[in-house]
Image (spheres, grey):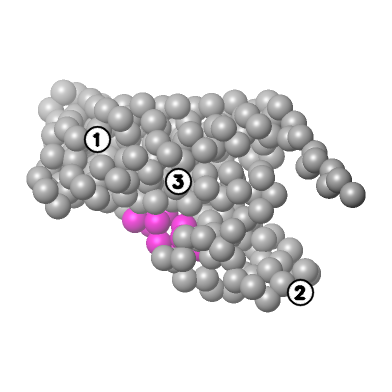
Amino acid sequence: MERPFPPRASAKTQYLIAYNLASGLLWLTILGRLVLLVPLVGARHTYGGVGQFARWTQTAAVAEVAHSLFGVVRAPVLTTALQIASRLLLVWGIVHTFPQVAASWAYTSMLAAWALSEVVRYSYFVFNLRGAVPPALTWLRYVSISSGGRPKPLICARYNAFFVLYPLGIASEMWLVYLAASGPAGEIRKELAWGLYAVLGLYVPGTYVLFSHMMAQRRKIIRGKQRLR
């Protein structure tokens, strides 16, 4: 008896798989460059080695706001736009405008946090869209999520890694904004520096919104897995 062919994925699903796969590979490239570059020449040269590539990779993520806005994915527009806008501020408004601040270790730690979180996130989406999330990325310990008694480290990486990577990324971002506000921005115009200090203040509610969203997603996944047991 012949086995039936698996159903063909919709055009939207194929597009999202391709988009997430490409995005994950771009961020994996950034992570690989950091791993190779920093031990050889130090964090002071991170911007020269990966800055432009990282800037355009992050800029391409503007598509995710459109995905959310037009219903291509079920993601909240506000949370998506907030995260993308804050990162664009960093890569264009801060580091590109004041490249001297990128000599700080905060720039390297920021890119490392972004790259790690995005590799996990895009990998999860690719496999989830294909209908099978494998027990991968075992470098992260799973905490409480499992499926049918079998641990799923990739799922746990997606919904536990942010406990470490978000604070690291946010702290690095805030330090870079502070360096720009207290240094080169203030030398251009005091109003510009005050504006950046105001941005630092916005990180408090912004961080709350992002963490609340991820915690809600994590609780949803845990409840779903517990129902399957």
* The residue positioned farthest toward the front in the image shown: 1
Q: Residues within 10 Å of mark 1 (few under 14, many from 20)?
A: some
Instruction: Please tell me whether residue 177 is drawn above or below residue 205 in the rendered image.
Output: above
Instruction: Please tell me whether residue 15 is drawn above or below residue 108 in the rendered image.
Output: above
Front-most of residues 34 and 219: 34
Front-most of residues 67 and 5: 5
Residue type at mark 3: give it.
Glu
Residue for badge 1: 50
Label of residue 229 in the image: 2
Q: Position of residue 3 (x, y in %)?
A: 83, 47
Q: Position of residue 61 (x, y in %)?
A: 48, 31
Q: Quadrant of residue 10?
A: top right
Residue 179 vs residue 71: left or right?
Answer: left
First in sequence: mark 1 vs mark 2: 1
Q: Position of residue 164 (x, y in %)?
A: 40, 62
> Which residues are the magenta region?
159-170
Residue for badge 3: 118
Which residue is pictured at 16% across the width and 23% down the height?
188
User: Tag 1's secondary structure?
Assistant: helix
First in sequence: mark 3 vs mark 1: 1
Label of residue 108 in the image: none
**Contact flag, marks 3 and 1 (Cβ < 8 Å):** no
* Predominant SS along the magenta part: helix
